[in-house]
Structures are given as C-alpha cells and as structure tokens.
Image (cartoon, rainbow, N blue to C red):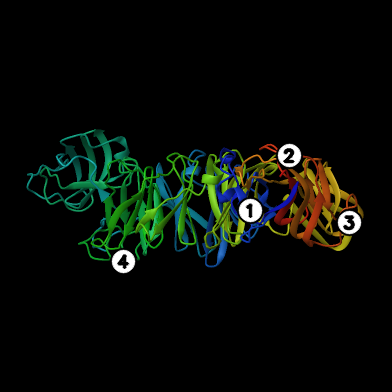
Amino acid sequence: MTILSTTKTNFTSGEIDPALAGRIDIQAWQDGAALLRNVIVRSSGGVARRPGTRLVVELPDARRLIAFDVEGTSFILALAPGTMTVVESDSIVESDIPTPWDATMLGELTWTRIDRSLLVCHGDVPPQLVTRTPSQSWTMAPIAFAVAAEDGVTPPILQPCSRFAGPEVALQATDVGVARESSESIPAGSLVRLTASGPVFSAGHTNTIIRLHGREIAIQSVASHSEAFGMVRQPLIDGRATRQWDEQTFSAARGWPVATSQHQDRLVLAGGRSAPDRVVFSRTGRPFDFDPGTGLDDEAFGFSLRGDRQHAIRQLVSGRRLQILTDCGEWVVSGAPLTPTTAQVSQQTHVGSPKDRQIRATGIDGVTHFVGGSLRDLREFLYTDTEQAFQAPDIALLSRHLMVDPVDMEFDPARRLLAIVRADGRMACVSIDRNANIVAWTLQETAGSFRAVVTSGHTLFTLVERSSGTWLEAFDDALRLDGCLVLSADNASVHWNGLEALLGEEVLVIGDGDIVADTVLAAGDILLAEPASELVVGRPFVHRIEALPLAMRSGNGQSADPLYRPVRYSFRVHETTALHVDAGQGSRQLLSRGTSGPPMTGPMTGDVTMRAFGWRRGYAARPWTITQREPEPFALLCATTEMKVSE
C-alpha cells in the first residue's frame, strides 16, 4: 500500500457541469467543485459563505430595477406594471408614478442617462424621459425632440426621418381649401390631401410628420393606405407629385426605438418595428437634435446595418467603440472622432442576442459581457491583438447547467461578482477577475425567488419575492441570514417588536452576536430569555460544497475512478467559526461557537483535520461534502486528501 496526498489549492473554475464528468484531463477538474451553493469564489481562489441580505423596502408587484445617479445621489427606480417607485437611502421618496409599460414590457426595456434624466426605450411606446427636477420631484414624459431656431409659428422638428416606402412611390399634396395650380406653393396652415402612388399610410400615421422636400406636414387623419389628410407646417414648394419625401423614423406606425445609448457626446437611438437595423446619432452635445444639416462633423447622421441577414438591433454598448448587439450578430462602429464622414461599421461576430427579452450587457475590465441568443451562453466581446478583430468566447462552457433561462444581470465590482437572475428564482453568480484568470460559477438560493438585481452606490441590491411580499434587499457582508431586520436599542431589552415583515417565516434570531432562537415567528414581537442591545432576525440559508471525485495519474495512465482509501482530510480555513464535513459517515461538526460541538472563542485561520475510513471509487463516491446552516463566517482556502492506494 502507498500513501499519497493530493491538495485542491483553489476553486477558480467554480461548479463544473456534470456533462463534463469525463474531462478529467482539463485543469478545471483540479480547480473546480461538483457543487457550490450559496457560496462565492474569491479572487484569491478560496470559497466563502455568501453575504446575507437586509430588508430595505417592500415593493409590491415590482419586476425591474434601474440604478440612477443624480448629482452624487444614488436612486433605484423600481418598475411594476404601470407604475414606478423611487428609492433613496433605504426609503421610498416617491411612488405610484404612472408609466406606459405593462407586465410584458418590463423585461424588454433599455435606457441611458442624459444629464438629470433617464431615457427609457421600448419598441411599442414612445421613449420616456424620467427626470428629477430641481425641486426634487420626479416626472415622466415622452421624449420631445428639439425644434429649429427659425422664425415662424411651426418651426421644423429636428427628429430623425427615414424613407420606408419604395423609391418608386411618389407623394402629392393638394390644397383642400383653395384651388391651386400644381406649380404653386402651398402656404403653412393649409389643409392638404396627400395622395400616394402606392400603399404608404396606416392608422398609426395619425399625428405623425411627413416631409416633402424637407417641408413638414402633420397628418390629421388617414383615409386609406394611399390617402391621408394633414396640416402644412412649413410652406410647400409646390403641389406636384414627388419622390423626394420621407417620414419620421420613430412613430406609432413604424415603431419606436428598441435600444439607446450615448457615445462620444451623441445620443444614439436604434431599432424599431419597420427599421430594425436602423441607427441614428444626434448632433454632438445636443441629444435631442437629429438634424443632419449639411453633413458637418458635429451634425446628426444615421445608417442601416447591411448583411446577408436582416439584423434586428437589441442593444447598444458604448465603449472605446460603439458596439451594436443584434439578434444574429455583433457589430462595431469606429471613428475617432465619430462624424458623418468618418463612421465605419462592420460585423465582428455572429452570436446574436435574445429576441424576447433585454438582459442588459455589462462592461467588466473593458470587456463587454452579454447573454447569447440561446440563453445558455455568456459571452465576452473583446478585441484580440492576435486576430486584430473582436471575438466572443463563451465563458459559461464549464458551467452550462447553471446558465438557464436568465432574465436579469448586473456586476458587483466590490466583490468582482456578476449576478445573473434566472426565471426559476435562483441566481447564478460568476466571480470574474481577468488578471487572475478566474471565471468561477456558483448558484445562490433563498427562501423565495430572486426577480431582479442592480448595483447602486457600491451595493448590490436584489428584488426578492417572498411569502410576505416582494422586497428590495441589499447584500451585506455583516449579515449571514436572508431578508434580515436589524434592530438596536440604547439599553438592552428582552422585548423587541417591529418584526411584522417576517411574520409566519422560519427565522433565526441573533442577539448581540449569539443565536438565541430558531423558530417560526408567530407575532410581530419576540421575548428573549436574556436582554440584548442588538437584534438580527432573518431567514436561514444553507451553503453546500461538494468536492469532485478524485482522478489520478499513475504509471498505467490516468484513471477516472481509482480505488483509494482516504485516511485523513485537512481543511485550511480563513476566519471561520463553523465547519461541518461529511466524509462518508455522516456530517461531523469540526468547528462551532455553539455548545453542541468543540467550542471556540473567535474566528479560526489554520488547518482543521479529520479521519476518514473506507475504500472508495467511482463518480458517486465524493471525497467530502461541507454543509452549513449556521449563520457563522466560513471561508475554505484549500483541502488536502491523504489516502492509501494499492501498489
């Protein structure tokens, strides 16, 4: 018999997909785990119990969270069907603000910040401008484009315009009130009949703008697909039929922008029902002015994506270059500076983004991370020097089983954690550190369902649907329970109230750092056996770590199911006060601050060992499993297995 030792020095490959159980040849097998639940992988390589969450405010029916900073103050906009609530510093500052978005639209919104406002887009309704006024109130109104600085009652609206009908379709304006020769001009304020040589109009054209030779006509009614009536806003050159006409790019008839961003001090709008591949840029420094003028460097411009397939734009991402994510590929717009004459657009990759939802792409260390159209891949869109082009590798390859039906995504820079909310109410988390070559997936679960996630003011917030309602909760490193209420008093007391938010829930009660009750809360108050000056009441959660089966290399080659007998396990922990390990004979409590196990006075950093018995082999024979319900600090740095093997 030979005694061997093997040490798992890190967990930087995260939880490994069971579909890769045969790939014992890859490094990820040495650096991963079979199961990582309610833990996060640190940049140093160790794995630790995740932070708990603190109840912030109740947000009934909320489904989407948007972070918005104004003059150094961080706000969270919580969107529910038809309403918006504004949260600041753990309190609601304004609620029941009407919105045009129903429940089916909330998952398809895109937005960008413009000064004190937030522009929010959805393809079925006009873009909405959410503004915090100087008086600290909140307003929401449809976007209003700039108007030309010209004399006259009805100056031109400086909005983007496009041609949707074929180039052969002509349009003629005829004055309804005055008989005129077709060569005569038609003055502003005249009611005209617009007659098209082909189908142009629909009911949605009412209250939209048609331009003939750049002169505007406001449509008042539609008689048929080829006839409409409108009011002349600027004098028309004549009444002849002309092919030199266009209409506003975004309208009820043609659809509203799907995506928005700001790039090089220009507002960018893109997508839409009738022009899904169209992108328009405002004038530099004038976000609501889309006048192309004469093509000067600071004037507005636009273009359509042209390829072998019809591209429907889904998102815009501003970086060193503007990135355009469509349903079937990724494009880059370059130009320094970006002007009507220097703009160049090219397709880089062919992955595609989801068509039925908007999962906001996020930038991490200069790299754009986005969810692929299959909803099973997480892509890094980055420029590579070797290829001199952008590539989009999939970083969910090792943990595909965790990337399931995502609905929201946000990066927490403080913890280097990308949080991905899934439709089933669980949350996949990816520890990402490109400098340390770490991409480690874990899965978070709670007594309820995660619905949305956002980072605001250096804090990661999540929207959680629980039996007691839907709550905004904040991840807090000082807490190790979920949905916590944290109460304090100047004088220690045995009677505490104000716990109605947790009524009927299974909770742990921590008084002055010690667990004093494990119960189902039957009332909004609680009576302690001993007085305490600080009380934390929250829902417990269990973290679980399962090691991968051992794979060994010998003179006969590498074996996926070697026969071995573990003799001793050694776990190196960091600032840990609880450790429960199952090495095949049931869970053993190796560390505990309680009275039922070996007592300890403070967090431990060092090695904790245990004996092990029995011969093992095969995939099902996991070396060890760590499970912990106690709300105590836990961090595992490495694990060593000392074993006997046959000669």
Q: Amino acid at mark 3?
A: Pro
Q: Amino acid at mark 4?
A: Ala
First-in-chain label (2 vs 3): 3
Q: Amino acid at mark 2?
A: Arg
Question: x, y percentage for residue 495?
Answer: 88, 53
Q: With respect to residue 227, does 99 lie above or below?
A: below
Question: x, y percentage for residue 529?
Answer: 93, 52
Residue 332 appearing in the image: yes
Q: Is residue 43 left or right of residue 241?
A: right
**Residue at mark 2 to residue at mark 3: CA–CA distance:** 32 Å
Q: Is residue 486 left or right of residue 17?
A: right
Which residue matches tag 3? 599
Q: Residues within 10 Å of mark 1 (few under 14, many from 20)?
A: many
For discs 4 and 3, the disc positioned in front in the rendered view: 3
Question: x, y percentage for residue 236?
Answer: 15, 51
Which residue matches tag 4? 336
Which residue matches tag 2? 616
For discs 2 and 3, the disc positioned in front in the rendered view: 2
Q: Secondary structure at mark 3?
A: loop
First-in-chain label (1 vs 3): 1
First-in-chain label (4 vs 3): 4
For discs 1 and 3, the disc positioned in front in the rendered view: 1
Q: Residues within 10 Å of mark 4 (few under 14, many from 20)?
A: few
Which residue matches tag 1? 11
